[in-house]
Image: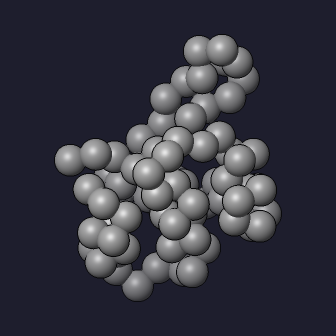
Amino acid sequence: MSCEQVQQHLPSVPDSVRTVVDALCGRRLTMKDLQDESGLARRTVYGALRRLREMGYVEARPNLQDTRQTWFSLRET
């Protein structure tokens, strides 16, 4: 699903959720990368990711080079 399609399917959500979708557009990022890209606080990014994962738009995969980190990306359908 493209970034534009995800944005269109999102119900009224906080701007922080839309900001995280924009940051993930076409790439995978760690929590730290998302914080740096979006300028949002860690707690805000975490909440946005949780909401997007519950809605089925974001997937999480372990970083095999550094198991302390997780990669987040928009789910492709």
Can see residue 53? Answer: no
- Drawn side of residue 72 relative to residue 44, left or right: left
Can see residue 18? Answer: yes
| Between 61 and 43, the one nearer to me in the picture | 61
Q: Residue at x 27, y 69 (%)?
A: 5
**How was this image coloured?**
one colour
Q: Is residue 29 above or below residue 41?
A: above
Q: Looking at this view, name the residue that lies furthest to the bottom.
A: 12
Tell me where residue 31 appears, x and y as whole percent.
Answer: 68, 45
Q: Residue at x 49, y 63 (%)?
A: 21
Q: Residue at x 69, y 65 (%)?
A: 38
- Drawn side of residue 8 relative to residue 66, left or right: left
Q: Quadrant of residue 43?
A: bottom right
Q: Is residue 1 above or below residue 44?
A: above
Tell me where residue 76 appears, x and y as whole percent.
Answer: 28, 45
Q: Residue at x 51, y 66 (%)?
A: 22
Q: Looking at this view, name the residue that lies furthest to the front.
A: 26
